[in-house]
Each structure stands twice: as structure tokens, then as C-alpha cells.
Image (cartoon, coloured by chain):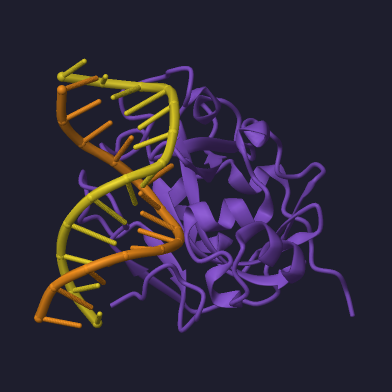
Chain colours: A purple, B yellow, C orange
Amino acid sequence: MPRPAKLRRDFFNRSVHAVAPELIGATLTVGGVGGIIVEVEAYHHTDPAAHSYRGRTERNAVMFGPPGYLYVYRSYGIHWCANVVCEADGSASAVLLRALEPTQGLDVMRRRRGVSEARLLCSGPARLCQALGITDAHNGAALDRAPFSLYARAATPEIVIGPRIGITKAAEVPWRYGLKGSRFLSKPFR
DNA sequence: TATGAGATCAACT
DNA sequence: GTTGATCTCATAC
């Protein structure tokens, strides 16, 4: 049984709207703990909801750097959320990792999260970071280097698309992508 | 099932 | 001083 191909950094050097749907079904692990990406959202610097919309700041500096790196920020003062930077040339766009289907290191994730139900381990951007142990220490880290591993999907899954979650600006644009029928989404698509 | 409050911080007005 | 790419727990229906 052949190992799935590792995603190269080039993969991210394209429009977020091309990268985001293709990430669905890929496998992400951090230190051997992780699972299959089932939900992401796309953010572009022309998008009022994006952190990079108003230009470069200390917090979002990674978004203005090369693609294939992680942008981690603190959400609501207490959570971490992780994005993958896309498109070079300072387009400052990124894909928000919103949910995984846990497949590896379930026990570690349960311990970090303090819950046992698999469904609650990674079904949300902050839960995902907590389960995988992602913090601001990983801000600016490359996804193709340890402790990260990212493997391309084996087959093309069925993708569902809808409006993004939890934002007030540009809330209507359908830039949320999910794996059809997955039980591990942060919220169902309609 | 649904709605609301609290946690807690950095960017922005 | 307000807001936000969130989650959890409590209380109400």
C-alpha cells in the first residue's frame, strides 16, 4: 500500500479559492497527532473579514510572507486558531483550518482536550488547535517540516460549500468548504 | 433545542 | 472603550 504523497510548499502558491477546496480530505498531523481535514475557510486580503484586510501588523505579519507557513492567532483572548498562508506576492491570503476527522493520536487529543468523544476533539478551529497542540509557538512554522506532516488526499472527495461561520463582515460569501456528510464538521452545511 | 454569559487579549476606533 | 475567524457551561423553554 503506497504512502500518500506529501504536499509540497508549491501547493499553497495559488489562489486561496483553489487551495481551500483541495485541502479537504488531506491528512494533517503535528508530532504524529492529527487527522483528515474536513472543513476550512478561505480569507483573502481583499476580504473585509480577513485579518490582513487593513494591511500588515505585527500579529498578521506571517500572512504577508511566503505560502505554506502557519499563521496562528489568539481568538477571543483564550483560544488559538491556525491558518495556512497561500499565494505569494504579499497577497496575504490564508486558509483557516476549522475541523479535522481525528485518525491518529486519539488518546493524546482526548487528554489535551479533556473530552472523550471523538466528535468533539477537532470540530472547530480552536478545538483543533488544542487537540493538535498548536499555539503561538507555531506561528510562522513551515507545514512541510517537523513536527508537521501534510499528506495529499488519495481520491477526490465530495465537497460542500457555504457561508463562513462566526463573522459579521462579508458573512454572505460562500468561502467555507467541507467534506460532504462528515460527522466532524464544526457546524452542518445547509 | 436555544439562548446567554464568562473567559481574556490585542487590534482598532 | 469596543469588538472579535470561539468554546463551554448554565439556565430556560
Counting from the top left corner in percent of width and height, residue A80 is at: 52, 43
Q: Quadrant of the C terminus of chain A?
A: bottom left
Q: Is residue A104 visible?
A: no
Q: Is residue C12 toward the left or the right of residue A42 in the image?
A: left
Q: Closer to the camera, A23 or A124? A: A124
Residue sticking out furthest to the right: A1
Relative image position of residue A155 (x, y in whole percent): 65, 77
- Direction from residue A166 to residue A18 in the image, left or right: right
For residue A81, side relative to residue A130 (left or right): left
Numbered disc total: 0
Specify the quadrant of the image occupied by residue A12.
top right
Q: Residue at x 58, y 67 (%)?
A: A121
Which x, y percent locates residue A161?
36, 68
Between residue A52 and residue A73, name the one nearer to us: A73
Instruction: Report whether A43 appears left or right of A94.
Output: left
Q: Is A81 in front, or is A120? A: A120
Quadrant for the N terminus of chain A, please. bottom right
Q: Is residue A141 visible?
A: yes
Residue drawn at the location 54% of the way across and 45% of the way down: A82
Instruction: From the top left corner, tell me how far across and down residue A51 is, in percent.
Output: 37, 33
Task: Examine the rendered structure and indicate whether residue A186 appears above or below residue A131.
Answer: below
The correct choice, above or below, for A60 with respect to A134 in the image is: above
Residue under the image location 70 percent in, 44 percent down: A143
